[in-house]
């Protein structure tokens, strides 16, 4: 069985045509993309690297990494999102290999191929995040870099990521997130270690509603990012 929730795929597929509109429901992704792109590049120097973007959606991060000189493959299970991603390449002139395939399936075909694997804002949307993490580890070369980002599970995260972002500030459509699927850093770290990934850096991402700006720091109570490296 494919590790995907059909209702989640349909939800994002319905919005796919607005993926590259910075004023749309995807505005938060546009706002955080420079932060996460710079952080990833600082950690592993993307230029010349073979990179796999798992759950690439409409290709915001994929194209950004390509602009930094990486050879990028983006995978997703939403055909609509991938169509939007491919169409945007005609406008941007970037070269990204977009494929409709699950991470687990690709791991069976191309294990140990990639210098860098990214899986951002996806783990909280799949039924079995540990399976996705294992697939990402399998796809990385020995010594390769694997990056994750997701949302912590605690009352503060529920208040800010669900009530605040979806209902009060209306930054995201209602129902975007299911609190029960949020992941504590301790859980993500445990799953990563179990498949041979050593943690190098954990960063929190915070949002200031007064300035409308995001920032990376040590507060991982809500959104956070994890950089790991695959054991040799």
Image (cartoon, helix red, strand yellow):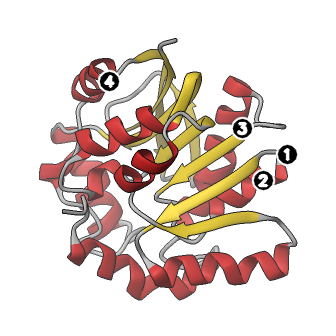
Q: Which residue is mark 2?
A: 66
Q: CA distance from mark 3 to mark 1?
A: 13 Å
Q: Which mark is residue 69?
A: 1
Q: Are marks 1 and 2 in contact (CB under 8 Å)?
A: yes
Q: Quadrant of residue 162?
A: bottom left
x and y, in percent, of residue 199 in the image? 44, 16
Q: Are marks 3 and 1 in contact (CB under 8 Å)?
A: no
Front-most of 149 and 25? Answer: 149
Q: CA distance from mark 1 to mark 4?
A: 29 Å
Is residue 222 at least partly visible in the picture? no
Q: Which residue is mark 3?
A: 38
Q: Nearer the viewer, mark 2 or mark 3?
A: 2
Name the element at disc 3: helix
- Quadrant where the N terminus is found in the figure: bottom left
Q: Earlier in the sequence, mark 3 or mark 1?
A: 3
Front-most of 207 and 90? Answer: 90
Residue lying at 24% horizontally and 21% vertically, measured from the top left: 190
Q: Nearer the viewer, mark 3 or mark 4?
A: 4
Number of residues whose C-alpha sits closer than 10 Å to that of mark 4, classed few (under 14), some (14–19) or many (20 or more): some
Q: Nearer the viewer, mark 1 or mark 4?
A: 4
Q: Is residue 34 left or right of residue 7?
A: right
Name the element at disc 2: helix
x and y, in percent, of residue 154 in the image? 17, 37
Q: Earlier in the sequence, mark 2 or mark 3?
A: 3
Front-most of 123 and 224? Answer: 123
Name the element at disc 1: loop
Q: Residue furthest front?
A: 109
Q: Earlier in the sequence, mark 1 or mark 4?
A: 1
Q: Quadrant of residue 86?
A: bottom right
x and y, in percent, of residue 142 in the image? 55, 20
Q: Which residue is mark 4?
A: 195
């Amino acid at each position: 069985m494919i590790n995907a929730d059909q209702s989640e795929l349909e939800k994002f597929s319905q919005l796919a045509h607005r993926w590259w509109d910075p004023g749309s429901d995807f505005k938060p992704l546009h706002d955080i993309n420079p932060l996460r792109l710079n952080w990833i590049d600082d950690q592993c120097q993307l230029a010349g690297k073979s990179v796999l973007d798992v759950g690439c959606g409409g290709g915001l991060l994929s194209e950004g990494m390509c602009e930094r000189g990486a050879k990028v493959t983006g995978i997703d299970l939403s055909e609509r999102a991938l169509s939007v991603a491919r169409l945007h390449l005609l406008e941007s002139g970037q070269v990204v290999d977009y494929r409709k395939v699950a991470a687990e399936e690709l791991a069976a075909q191309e294990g140990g191929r990639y210098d860098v694997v990214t899986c951002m804002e996806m783990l909280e949307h799949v039924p079995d995040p540990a399976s996705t993490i294992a697939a990402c580890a399998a796809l990385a070369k020995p010594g390769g870099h694997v990056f994750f980002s997701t949302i912590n599970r605690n009352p503060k995260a529920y208040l800010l990521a669900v009530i605040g972002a979806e209902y009060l500030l209306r930054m995201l459509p209602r129902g975007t997130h299911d609190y029960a699927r949020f992941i504590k850093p301790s859980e993500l770290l445990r799953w990563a270690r179990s498949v041979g990934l050593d943690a190098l850096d954990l960063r929190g991402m915070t949002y200031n509603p007064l300035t409308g700006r995001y920032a990376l720091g040590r507060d991982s109570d809500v959104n956070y990012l994890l950089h790991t490296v695959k054991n040799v």
